[in-house]
Image (cartoon, rainbow, N blue to C red):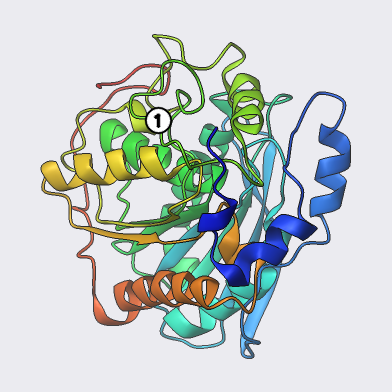
Amino acid sequence: MTTSKHLIDPDLLPVVEQIPPMVPTAESLPGLRAALTGLRSPAPAASGVTVEERAVPGPDGSPVRVLVYAPETRTRTGALLWLHAGGMVMGTPDMYEPQSRFLARQAGCVVIAVDYGLAPENPYPAGLEDCYAVLRWAHAAADELGIPRGRIAVTGESGGGGLAAALALLARDRGELAVSAQFLEYPMLDDRTGTPAEPDPMPHAGEFVWTKDSNRFAWGSVLGDEPGGADAPIYASPGRAEELAGLPPAFIGVGALDLFVGENLRFARGLIRASVPTELHVYPGALYGFASFSEDAEVAKNIRRDFWGAIERHFRDGGLDPAAEAPAGGAEARGGRR
């Protein structure tokens, strides 16, 4: 690895000094999970929003915990499923309470933060099916929530961003539930990243915070097998998907030094090639987690402005036209078209 420290935005250097690389292992994972419980995403204070913890019926009948943030208004613009970060092996929706409240107020939508099952205790497709069950519930409960069924979007950061992209693929192919947009904040999309099978390695990416070792452990936990093999399902690893036509419009934001930058660029290119409306931002000097780990760095403010702005335009102004009400398809979660 060629060192990339000289390429880091100076405002983000404290992140490197304060947050050592997250290297989850079977032994370190409990401690990392505990350390993340106190993290809260930076966002302006937001009044006029209620929060309710609910139990949504999961795929096997067991409950999936969700936090429902609702603006105190009779006219709500839609619903946003928020899927938290943590490489699909750690993290909770509670970490994003400030942002969830803020987005509910700014966009006028109901934010549904999902406490999906984490690997390795819940390997693929458990976490994804939890999210699909919540998407189904959001459609069924639209009248109760006071939202239009045609504007239910998905979003997430890192591992949650990868789940959001996978959920959009799964919804398209099952053809039961519409997703109006996907907002992906440096999404974790491709199990091949950091392995010899990586299609286009980026020499300056992934040195800090979330490294190749971190990624391999997380993907191995999700897949229950060594990452980078030939047969990982696209709904586990959506960066492998080749047929992207018919997906909902996308926003993708990623740092140039993030381990995920290569897979994010490939995914955005595939979306654009498939005529999916796509907004892509690559932030120079930015590393993994910069939106959540730095409140004051200008580049962190920039991605939050762009990310939140895209969400607000979608719900308030109709930006990123919603997907069709009944997408075509019908593949199941363990296979699917590539």
| Residue to which mark 1 is pinned | 201
Residue at the image point whose x is 38% and y is 37% from the top: 263
Q: Which of the 4 image quadrants contains residue 233?
A: top left
Percent across and percent down for residue 267 are: 30, 40
- Left or right: 124 with respect to 20? left
- Left or right: 321 with respect to 152? left
The answer, for residue 245, to whether it is visible in the render is yes
Q: Nearer the viewer, residue 22 or 81?
A: 22
- Left or right: 171 with respect to 70? left
Q: Which of the 4 image quadrants contains residue 87?
A: top right
The answer, for residue 83, to whether it is visible in the render is no
The amino acid marked with disc number 1 is Pro
Above or below: residue 113 compared with residue 314: above
Above or below: residue 212 compared with residue 255: above
Percent across and percent down for residue 176 are: 31, 39
Residue at the image point whose x is 76% and y is 58% from the top: 17
Q: Nearer the viewer, residue 320 or 281?
A: 281
Q: How many marks?
A: 1
Residue at the image point whose x is 87% and y is 47% from the top: 34
Q: Nearer the viewer, residue 222 or 146?
A: 222
Q: Mark 1, residues whose alpha carbon is within 10 Å: few (<14), some, or many (≥20)?
A: some
Residue at the image point whose x is 18% and y is 52% from the top: 324
Above or below: residue 201 compared with residue 312: above
- Left or right: 128 with respect to 169? right
- Pick the quarter of the image with the N terminus: top right
- Pick the quarter of the image with the C terminus: top left
Element type where label 1 sits in the image:
loop
Percent across and percent down for residue 292 are: 63, 64
